[in-house]
Amino acid sequence: MSASIQDHVSQTVQSQAKQLKTSNDINDIALSQGRFISFEGTEGVGKTTAIEQLCTRLDDNNIAYLRTREPGGSPFAERLRAILLDPATDINDDTELLLLFAARCDHMQQVILPALQRGTWVICDRFTDSTIAYQGFGRAHGDAVVRAKIESLIEQFVPQLPELTLWLDLPVLEGMARANKRSAADRFEQQVTEFFTWVHKGFNTLATQHPERIQRIDASGTADEVSARVWQAVQGRFDVS
């Protein structure tokens, strides 16, 4: 990693620690205005298509929204995304975790919170649940120490969780078969079946622990069928026609 990126990571984490002292006020503002929805799932479950179709429905209902993603979503976070997804990147698990949260801090402060405060809905492709599932379960097989480390970082640097998380659930092998038909695999997509089996277990564990926020969406069937299930979940949570 270049010195400039290292410096920016350090500055970002220090800056966010200061800014998040007022996170309770920010959280109240965000909750009273824009809605925050995240999409989760293992590889090949159809998140991109489901998000596109949800955004179309929001357009049809004249709901202002911002579509974003993680890792990434802000200029600096996108630079870290390129590092994290590059198959040539050789880093240990702690470095990976800290880079993810440096990207998330910048994304949160530069993009997500301002949008929510404007009254804009935020539709995010992956958020903290992916970190728990991929790093906490995929990498660490649910190790309690690693999960506690991730939860501590969330508590310190993530002042706003999604109000609704849509977990697109599909058998791991079916999702991998879909993903393999896409372009060259990135650093995460190159992982073996066991890794994604653990990731799936992570999402299932989270959905069981947080039923008030995480809703399982059957990702089998046609794109329109999945889209209808997503829209039904959104209508059930928020006041939209």
Image: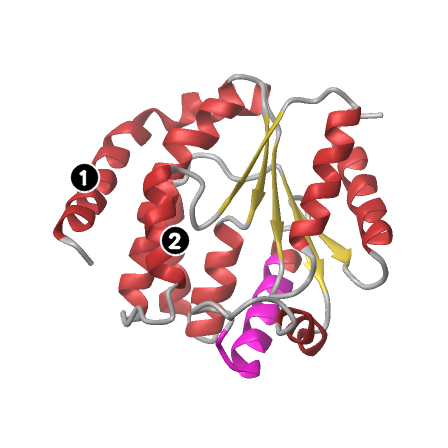
Q: Position of residue 151 (x, y in %)?
A: 41, 53
Residue at the spot 61% in from the left edge and 69% down from the top edge:
200
Q: Which mark is residue 122?
A: none
241 vs 23, nearest the viewer: 241
Neighbour class for label 1 at 10 Å: few (<14), some, many (≥20)?
few
Q: Is residue 82 above or below residue 196?
A: above
Q: Position of residue 41 (x, y in %)?
A: 62, 60
View extreme (top): residue: 118
82 vs 104, nearest the viewer: 82
Left or right: where 21 falls relative to 232? left
Q: Is residue 143 above or below residue 230?
A: below
Observer able to see residue 142: no
Q: Position of residue 154 (x, y in %)?
A: 40, 47
Secondary structure at badge 1 equals helix
Provide the residue designation for mark 1.
Answer: 11
160 vs 179, nearest the viewer: 179
Q: Is residue 195 magenta?
A: yes
Residue at the spot 27% in from the left edge and 69% down from the top edge:
91
The quadrant the N terminus occupies is bottom left
Provide the residue designation for mark 2.
Answer: 81
Left or right: where 216 falls relative to 26? right
Residue at the spot 50% in from the left edge and 19% down from the top edge:
117
Magenta segment boundaries in residue numbering: 190-206
Q: Is residue 199 magenta?
A: yes
Q: How many marks?
A: 2
Q: Position of residue 157 (x, y in %)?
A: 35, 41
Left or right: where 28 falls relative to 33? left
Residue type beneath disc 1: Gln
Q: Is residue 125 above or below residue 16?
A: below
Secondary structure at badge 2 equals helix
Q: Disc 2 versus disc 1: distance between alpha carbons?
A: 18 Å
Left or right: where 163 falls relative to 113? right
